[in-house]
Image: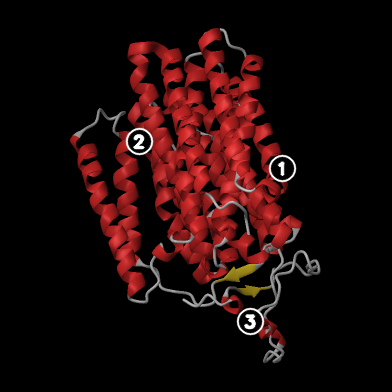
């Protein structure tokens, strides 16, 4: 694949009648053939740099928030779903895991399809599919139907989310790109906590007697509004030389993720049956086969689903290496804290969600400060953020140890605020580092790989920290099980702090 600047992106004007004029700060600099003096054959064939307007950026960020919110929004609704549908523990795990596995499995393919057929087009298809599958979840008459609808919803999310980063990469430069990526990072982190806050609110309010169904039905009008906005404000971009879908790579990546995530998320609830151990045994075989097939495809001059050369870019390699443990700890924490607050402190759904509001607020504040801080201090921002996050975990553990079981929302607020601020200094900067040296022609696949890593890490966190927490409950009780999970996450944070030393010292 050619990676000359002139061939990185082809564009199509957005549906909006006018667009804001490009300024020296916002317009991509002309290069290569794109800046040649030879006139284009006609006005319809003239390539102009796409420009993502502020409203367009808001629209794609809204599209990014929907799948991320829905990964966590069911956490506080699970007890109500269980009571209404008589689902049982294993089926409830499937409601969460079915979405996460389908989502993670198809993200890279979603990025590749966006490169091929157009990122705005896939964004619109993804929004429409997300709205329809959310409606199916909200109207599900039984647990098996809900699981099937959640799997379809995860697939729709995989079409939608990779287009966000690819569009930002292709339509912004310089300071505007830095701000957009920071806002994306803030959206990615805050959406996880907002999902549980919103879920608790909707279940508590019980809109028109819908109960837990409202956590899915609320997506329908939001997706419809985002679709109308995207059709008018998001410019079309695509890779200049679309390649065929890597069928063997796609199949092997799916097998790799399924054989790891499915038994880890479902094994404990099902009593660790034989199939869970068989799948875990198949995982290293599938992963090795995937790596070999992708390397062979790239050596043969084909374009693999995940180009190994992409992972040899220093910023991509070091950034993804740190994203895995960070999101593992984050995803596990969000699941464990939701269970502990409701089952241990006996918070209602709304109170449990409200306790995360300080984390949401400080995470977003830190993500907005990220661009200025990273330009001045480089990777030291991530190091500082990791240490602040560790401090927040220590404060939370001390609060749980000393105050259980009479801990109020106000007593949790200081540790939650510190924790969120540290996380907000880490995740947005990591996302920006991964994308900083990524060729624009690989924006779709690069965004897909990064989001797959992020999503897989969160699913692994739910499986590992969640399994640790739930397995300790019968023997030590909720307080000590929560403390064990918090201390385990603290050890993970210590590891991510060391991994931050591998990051580039400065950002390009």
Residue found 34% across the figure and 14% down from its top: 474
Indicate which disc, 3 or 1, sits on the residue closer to the N terminus. 3
Label 1: how many residues lie within 10 Å, few (<14), some (14-19) or many (20+)? some
List x then y, in percent, for residue 329: 47, 34
Q: Quadrant of residue 363?
A: top right
Indicate which disc, 3 or 2, sits on the residue closer to the N terminus. 3
**54 is higher (above) or lower (below) than 149:** below
List x then y, in percent, for residue 450: 49, 53
Q: Is residue 448 left or right of residue 291?
A: right
Check disc 3 and report the residue beneath it. 32
**Which label is found at residue 92?**
none
Q: CA distance from mark 3 to mark 1?
A: 35 Å
Work out whether residue 110 can be spotted.
yes
Label 2: how many residues lie within 10 Å, few (<14), some (14-19) or many (20+)? many
Q: CA distance from mark 1 to mark 2?
A: 35 Å
Element at badge 3?
Answer: helix
Check disc 2 and report the residue beneath it. 265
Label 3: how many residues lie within 10 Å, few (<14), some (14-19) or many (20+)? few
Element at badge 2?
Answer: helix
Work out whether residue 159 can be spotted.
no
List x then y, in percent, for residue 361: 68, 32
- 285 and 163: which one is in front? 285
Q: Quarter of the image containing the C terminus?
A: bottom right
**Which label is found at residue 369?**
1
């Amino acid at each position: 694949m050619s990676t000359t600047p002139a061939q990185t992106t082809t564009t199509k004007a957005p549906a909006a009648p006018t667009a804001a004029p490009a300024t020296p700060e916002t317009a991509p600099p002309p290069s290569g053939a794109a800046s040649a003096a030879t006139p284009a054959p006609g006005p319809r064939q003239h390539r102009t740099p796409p420009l993502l307007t502020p409203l367009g950026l808001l629209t794609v960020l809204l599209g990014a928030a929907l799948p991320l919110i829905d990964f966590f929004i069911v956490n506080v609704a699970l007890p109500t779903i269980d009571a209404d549908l008589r689902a049982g523990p294993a089926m409830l795990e499937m409601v969460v895991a079915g979405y996460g596995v389908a989502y993670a499995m198809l993200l890279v393919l979603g990025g590749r399809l966006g490169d091929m057929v157009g990122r705005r087009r896939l964004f619109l298809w993804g929004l429409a599919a997300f709205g329809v599958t959310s409606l199916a979840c909200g109207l599900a008459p039984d647990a098996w139907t809900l699981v099937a609808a959640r799997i379809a919803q995860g697939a729709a999310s995989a079409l939608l989310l990779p287009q966000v980063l690819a569009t930002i990469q292709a339509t912004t430069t310089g300071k505007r790109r830095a701000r957009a990526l920071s806002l994306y990072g803030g959206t990615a982190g805050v959406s996880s906590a907002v999902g549980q806050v919103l879920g608790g609110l909707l279940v508590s309010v019980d809109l028109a007697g819908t109960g837990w169904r409202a956590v899915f039905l609320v997506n329908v009008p939001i997706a419809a509004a985002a679709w109308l906005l995207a059709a008018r404000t998001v410019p079309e971009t695509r890779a200049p030389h679309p390649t065929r879908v890597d069928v063997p790579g796609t199949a092997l990546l799916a097998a790799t993720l399924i054989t790891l995530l499915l038994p880890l998320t479902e094994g404990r609830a099902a009593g660790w049956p034989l199939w869970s151990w068989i799948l875990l045994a198949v995982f290293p075989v599938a992963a090795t086969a995937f790596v070999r097939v992708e390397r062979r495809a790239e050596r043969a001059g084909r374009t693999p689903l995940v180009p190994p050369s992409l992972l040899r870019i220093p910023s991509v390699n070091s950034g993804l290496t740190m994203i895995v443990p960070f999101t593992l700890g984050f995803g596990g924490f969000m699941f464990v804290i939701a269970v502990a607050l409701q089952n241990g402190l006996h918070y209602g759904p709304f109170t449990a969600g409200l306790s995360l509001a300080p984390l949401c607020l400080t995470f977003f504040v830190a993500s907005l400060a990220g661009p200025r801080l990273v330009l001045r201090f480089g990777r030291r921002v991530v190091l500082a953020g990791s240490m602040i996050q560790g401090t927040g975990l220590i404060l939370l553990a001390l609060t749980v140890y000393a105050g259980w079981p009479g801990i109020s929302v106000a007593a949790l607020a200081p540790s939650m605020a510190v924790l969120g601020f540290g996380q907000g200094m880490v995740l947005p900067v990591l996302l920006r580092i991964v994308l900083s040296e990524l060729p624009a022609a690989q924006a779709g696949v690069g965004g897909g790989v990064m989001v797959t890593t992020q999503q897989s890490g969160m699913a692994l966190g739910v499986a590992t920290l969640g399994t640790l927490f739930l397995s300790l409950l019968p023997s030590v009780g909720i307080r000590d099980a929560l403390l064990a999970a918090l201390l385990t996450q603290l050890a993970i944070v210590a590891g991510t702090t060391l991994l931050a030393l591998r990051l580039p010292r400065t950002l390009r």
